[in-house]
Image (cartoon, rainbow, N blue to C red):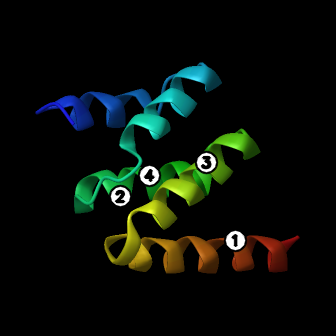
Amino acid sequence: KQPGIATYLVECLVDPQRCIRMAALDGLEGAQEREVLAAVLRCGKSDPEISVREKALLVLKAAGSAGQPFLEELEQARKAERKAE
């Protein structure tokens, strides 16, 4: 909840180490800012690790109504991915 920390945590979402990305998502849980939720959505769509993608989903759910549009977009992307398989 420190000023500016969300910006740093968003940058950590592309770190090569899974544990760093997971810790960043933990720190972003409860965030309501659109830019932060958009970054979490990107992580939920494209992270190479399923555990990180699932954690991103939980972070979006924790955002409540602010996260709802992002959750819907993630659901659509996952449906399209399953259909393509």
Residue mark closest to the camera, 2 vs 3: 3
Q: Which mark is residue 40?
A: 4
Residue 28 position by quadrant:
top left
In the image, what residue type sits under mark 1? Arg
In the image, what residue type sits under mark 2? Leu
Could you tell me if residue 55 is visible in this image? yes
Identify the image quadrant of the C terminus. Answer: bottom right
In the drawing, does residue 66 fall left or right of residue 58? left
Local packing at callout 1 (Cα closer than 10 Å; few below 14, some 14-19, many 20+) is some
The residue where tag 3 is placed is 55
**Residue 84: x and y, percent?**
82, 75
Q: CA distance from mark 2 to mark 4?
A: 5 Å
Could you tell me if residue 16 is visible in this image? no
Q: CA distance from mark 1 to mark 2?
A: 17 Å
The residue where tag 2 is placed is 37
In the drawing, does residue 51 fall left or right of residue 2? right
Local packing at callout 2 (Cα closer than 10 Å; few below 14, some 14-19, many 20+) is many
Residue mark closest to the camera, 4 vs 3: 3
State the residue in front, 60 or 79. 60
Local packing at callout 4 (Cα closer than 10 Å; few below 14, some 14-19, many 20+) is many
**Residue 83: x and y, percent?**
82, 80
Residue at (30% x, 51% y) in the render: 36
Of the numbered discs 1 and 2, the one sitting upstream in the chain is 2
Identify the image quadrant of the N terminus. Answer: top left
Of helix, strand and loop, which one carries label 3? helix
In the image, what residue type sits under mark 4? Val
Asked if the residues shown at circle 1 and circle 3 are in contact, with their CB atoms under 8 angstroms apart, the answer is: no
In the drawing, does residue 42 fall left or right of residue 55? left
The residue where tag 1 is placed is 78
Residue 44 vertical position relative to residue 64 in the rendered view, above or below:
above
